Image: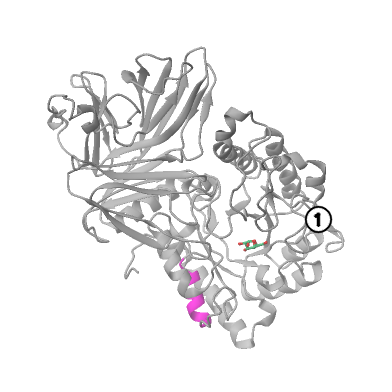
Amino acid sequence: MIFYLEENRIFVLETENTHYVFGIDSAGYNRHLHWGAKCDPADYAFTEIGDENSNHSMLDEYRQELTPFGSTVYRTCDLKAQFADGCREVALRYTGYRLEDDTLRVAFADAYYPLQVRLGYRVYPGLDIIKRWVEVENTGSAPISFERLFSAGFSLPGMDPYTFENTNGAWGGEFLPCRTVLDGGNLVYESHRGASNHNQSPYFIAHRGATETRGAVYFGSLAYSGNFKVIAGRDLYGITRVSLGMNDFDFSHTLEPGAHLETPPVYCGKTEGLGEMSRQMNRFCLEHLLPSRFRAETLPVLYNSWEATEFNVNVADQTRLAEIAAGIGVELFVMDDGWFGARNNDRAGLGDWFVNPAKFPGGLDELIGNVNALGMDFGLWVEPEMVNVNSHLYQAHPDWTIEIPGKPHAEGRNQRILDLTRREVQDYIIETMTNVFSSAEISYVKWDMNRTFTDYYSGALPPERQGEVAHRYVLGLYRCMRELTARFPDILFEGCSAGGNRFDLGILSYFPQIWASDDTDALCRAEIQTGYSYGYPMSVVSAHVSACPNHQTLRVTPLETRFAVAAFGICGYECNFCDLSREDFAAVKAQIALYKQWREVLQKGRFYRGRTF
Ligand code: GLA
């Protein structure tokens, strides 16, 4: 519930156990007042800050909900614009609010320029989660550019230093926890990779020595799949503030007259203990964020043929694997890379989304018919955002890739990134994927994205708008995902980005599960999956039992251990089923039966971490 106290212009966001309070002072500034236990709203008042003088700035000390650049604010700002005459300062003054059910918009206008800014808030019954975002609108007749446009600013209660938790990971080692006590200066977590998080994560978790069960924990997670920035700082007043949003390191966004832009949202909350933080986020994902079609579903046990056959797919070998998988209890058979175009290795074929006739003379229908006849659903791998130079698509549209004219291109995994800032490229992806998904009985799609961004440049944008490439790419990607998930609501999509390079609430708004890491070694995975458990439900963490010795670490791990770890996520199998001994066949069969018996609890249950790393 959200309510407004008219006489002192204070907004109270009431969640299940907390009050989040801010208001508008007599000068029209937005001022944060309280985040924590419920109190009597009459207790909330603006603290008067001492007189302004040349060494002490009142504005700098204010706990603003969103801090614009300008005047006597010297700390991190959340919003920086450039107006037609070159002025970059923003002077926001309150103009009104709109409260509809659980959603509040508080409006501000620049005192000198035609810019409107609205701070958005939403609460969710029964939860301690608050959604925050920012809307900007150009109400004038000349363009306005933004150099920084964050989604939210937070001022944490009290003056003592906070400990911040984030991740410091890599490909094959995602979500490894890191922890920093912030007693002064700024702490930055960010991504420049075009995707959200092989390294650091688009969220903040702040506390003062909290444990799983005790101590106030403040957190906020950005629902965004591109370059992000989280800046936490403790200033000269002892105030700890956090700002987060799209990264401004290579960012600009120009709003034409009449245009508006909404930032990606942040989902934030305050809980008692780290365990309750995770359970709040789990419930929020399961009840509000994930695609509604899959929120209540338990997810199937799948077999993915990648480790067994890599690019050497054909109807006979895949059918043989499917026969074993069906006998063992698998419910969904997935054929990975290699089924399309001239895709015999990773140097050709991406972009040519038609079935390779030499490998599948009867099209996909023949294999899918075999799989369905064995009682399993069928799934397919795609990587729609990419193209190999060695492909028909690249020959036809060499200008459709992200690259800088006249400069050598960085080739990651021998492939280039399609320019999703272009509408025609988005349309191509939507239409070719629609053809593939409707060509046969496809129940699941693994949507991969296997390289990081380089060469930030789009031939479709003028020079002064090149800073928009990274964000426009994410918007283009979301349009493709939104359109395709709407056209195919029953397909179970799994996100993947060279493992967990795009594991965030943005992807999860469209795809209900994500491949957690290309490292499937059970011991590594135990640590990686623990990392994920802080901010995401285990029902979105895709985890497979793979070969032994493990392909990434060469470690020998008992089948039982590999299953025990995979069973904490959405359990699947990837090892070559043709190599299974008679004992292992029986063991895997028993594992899958056990998993099916307990998966409701394992996927949807309340999650408590015991020992942590
Ligand atoms: C990535 C994925 C793998 C597999 C290959 C296919 O590396 O992480 O699981 O799908 O691509 O090329």
Percent x, y of residue 514? 54, 56
- Asked whether 1 or 257 is in front, the reply is 257
* Residue 127 visible in this rendered orientation of the protein: no
Which segment did they paint magenta? 558-568
The answer to whether residue 493 is above or below residue 595 is above
User: Can you identify the residue that label 1 sits on?
Assistant: 341
Horizontal relation, residue 190 to residue 40: left or right: right
The answer to whether residue 196 is above or below residue 500 is above
Horizontal relation, residue 469 to residue 368: left or right: left
Percent x, y of residue 577? 66, 77
- The C terminus: image quadrant: bottom left
Residue that lies at the very extreme toward the top in this rendered image:
141
Residue shown at the point (17%, 30%) measured from the top left: 56
Ligand 1 rendered quadrant: bottom right
Residue shown at the point (67%, 82%) measured from the top left: 579
- The N terminus: image quadrant: top left
- Residue 177: image quadrant is bottom left
- Asked whether 408 or 100 is in front, the reply is 408
